[in-house]
Amino acid sequence: MRLRAGFVVIAMVLSFFGARLVQLQAIDPQSYADMAAAEGSVEVVLPAERGEILDRNGIALAGSIEGVMIVADPLWTAPDAKPLAQLLSTSLGIDYFETLEALRADSRFEYVARRVPSTLANDVLDDAEAEGYKGLFTRRDPARDYPARDVAANLIGFLGTPDPEEGARPLAGFELTFDKLLSGKDGSAHYQVSGGNRIPLGVNTIEKAVDGDDLHTTIDLDLQWYVQRVLRQTVEDAGGSSGVAVVMDSRTGEITALADFPTYDATEPLESPKSAYVSRALADVYEPGSVEKVLTMSSLIDAGKVTPRTKLTVPPRLFRQDRPIKDWFPHDTIRLTLAGVLAQSSNIGTVLAADQFSPAALSRYLHKFGLGSTTGIGVRGETAGIIPAGPLLTSQTKDRMAFGQSLSVNAIQMAAAVNTIANGGVRVSPSIIAGAATTDDGVEVGTDTTTTRQVISADAAKQTMKMMEKVVDPEDGVAPSAQVPGYRVAGKTGTAQRVGKECGCYDGTFTVSFAGFAPADDPRFTVYVVVQDPKNGGGGGSVGGPAFSKIMSYALRRYAVPPTGTKPSDLPVEWGRPTADQ
Amino acid sequence: MSTPQLSDPGPGPLRKQAPRLPQIPGRAVAKARLRVVPRRRTRTPRVPFVMLVSLVLVAGVVGLLLFNTSMQQASFAASGLEEQARTLTARQQTLQMELDDLRDPQRVAEQAQALGMVPAASPAFLQLSDGKVIGVATPATIDNGLRIRPLPPRKPASLTPDPIIREEVADTGAGRRGTGAGDREDGKKRDRQDRQDRQARRN
């Protein structure tokens, strides 16, 4: 009897076991297997190191610093969550409540802070350990640094606050345009741990991270800094609203400096308005004004219509169909050569000379100079500008186009167009990326994709250069302040009426600019300075000229370009009056 | 196991053959007679085998243990070295950051300006081939200076209001001694003039 009772008990126990077995193995065995696998196993993202953005000498404009992420194992941190969260939030500057939540979470792995400079993270962890808190670890997590702060910030852009899931969030500039190239590919590691160490023969799979490629630009950091400071001083002193300065290598089309004002500090982007993030050199279009006259005149010379010595009788006013054309300076009927028209920046003289051209012919030349189409150098948000076409291209429009109104350009287009004259009539496409790089949109840009095109003959370019030298002539020209002591300089001023945003008409504000190159007879650099809406009444010569001179002088000095030691041109600016008494 | 004929060498056949042979002394015959050597039955000693097997076993177990331990040791060492590598990387990065900060053109310029330096004016070039000097070197002056910091933000006009000037007619009694008030008025006017000048300059 006792034996039977014993059997019954054993049978009952065994049937419980059986039922449990069925429960475990037949009903949802996978979840238990997963729980078993998750116990003591760790899955970690191995962040890829983001490529650097370098200047032409390999100095980092944007670099990745070895940041770390601080992660917590809430199993250990939960008991001391409050004081630990306080310590972490004060020393790392992170949110207390979010930290507290992370430290108390129901998991074994929680992010506490990301992209912390590793030295700081180590200090904080040492402090925590000294206080006796456990369960905090660090892992590699590259952060972004912009050592030169506002230098070239409008080109480089910046990374926003990283997303815990997605990682880096590029918000502007090259960081956004070349994100795929720079970011590389995150890897992952999956392994089992015991007591903080990997179990040697445990499950262990590692997918290595592929680091991003570096992006080489043609920017020269020190020159860029200098140009930005000169531009800022120029715009501030003139009371302008914004400004752009471009330095271009005349022979290769490489942009060695591209300054925008206003700009922002890439390490503190949120302290500046969003409007400061764009590169105005490409995003803003404006009417170039008299700088464009050099394109008109070089085209006319190339077509064989005029020479620098062509004699023009310039009346005080030129009455055309819709409205009279005036010069910036009052005068009676004067007799100027074409060189004099350029040196004195006479609109009337230019229009008279351009009468030799049909509207379509002028438009064709301007297109060949690269106006009206994007430069595609790889900077975001480029605006192509407009050259009037079709029914808009009337002879009155052509008259105004001849002296740089009624058409719009961006600063890089204009710099490349003036550079065409510096480079013997060959337009070399501008570039700001050294070598080649592919944007996220799949466009390949860079110096490897540079194209050249003969726009005007070498002789026409040389004749135009000689006329442009008269612009900075102390006696005959309007911009002696643009001279660079010791060097021959060719340049042109521009003071253009500006179209206001509200009325869509000329609102009485101006765009002043100066473009030029040096040494005039063997050009190395083309510099273009534009200031929008100056309030001190200055023109292209008085505002842009000194800035041009400073920038050009610095660039020539920095690249050790010796003066050519030749005499500047002595083209006559007037005719029919043997003794110039101006 | 073996055939009885071979295993048991009978004397019969040998004796039959003997008369045909030349006379050989019996002793020599006996000496030359071939016999099958009796099979020696050796008993392999068990002890060495057991020893060997247990040695292999023990060696295996100990080896495995040592291997495991060394793996574990290697894992510790790897963790330690990784930690060290991280620390060194962190140090290198910190130094790199310091270097970047030190070579920041803005910092260099500020330091140079603090020493009273200005950007260079036009230099002269010495041509080594014929010793010719190209260009004219001009010394830099204070006019070559560059403003490397942004202007302070312009204050709204409401923060610097023009002083309110009220003309007061001094009563005759205090007429002579009222010069103090007049002075103050003049001072106010001068203040305003100064401020307007400043405003104009700033604009």
Image (cartoon, rainbow, N blue to C red):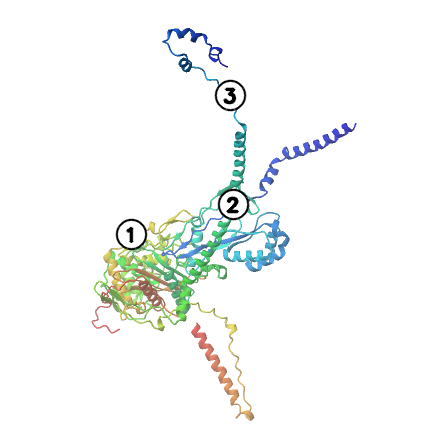
Residue behind mark 2? B73
**Residue lying farthest right?**
A1
Q: SS class of the residue under badge 2? A: helix
Residue behind mark 3? B41
> Few, some or many C-alpha atoms within 10 Å of disc 1 (few <14, some 14-19, many ≥20)?
some
The amino acid type found where label 3 is placed reads Arg
- Give residue A483's position: percent from left, percent from top: 30, 67
The CA span between labels 2 and 3 is 53 Å
The CA span between labels 3 and 1 is 106 Å
Instruction: Write down the quadrant of residue A241 in the picture.
Output: bottom left
- Give residue A7's position: percent from left, percent from top: 74, 29
> Can I make out residue A205 in this image?
yes
Residue behind mark 1? A453
Output the chain of dot 1.
A
Output the chain of dot 2.
B
The amino acid type found where label 2 is placed reads Gln
Q: Are marks 2 and 1 in contact (CB under 8 Å)?
A: no
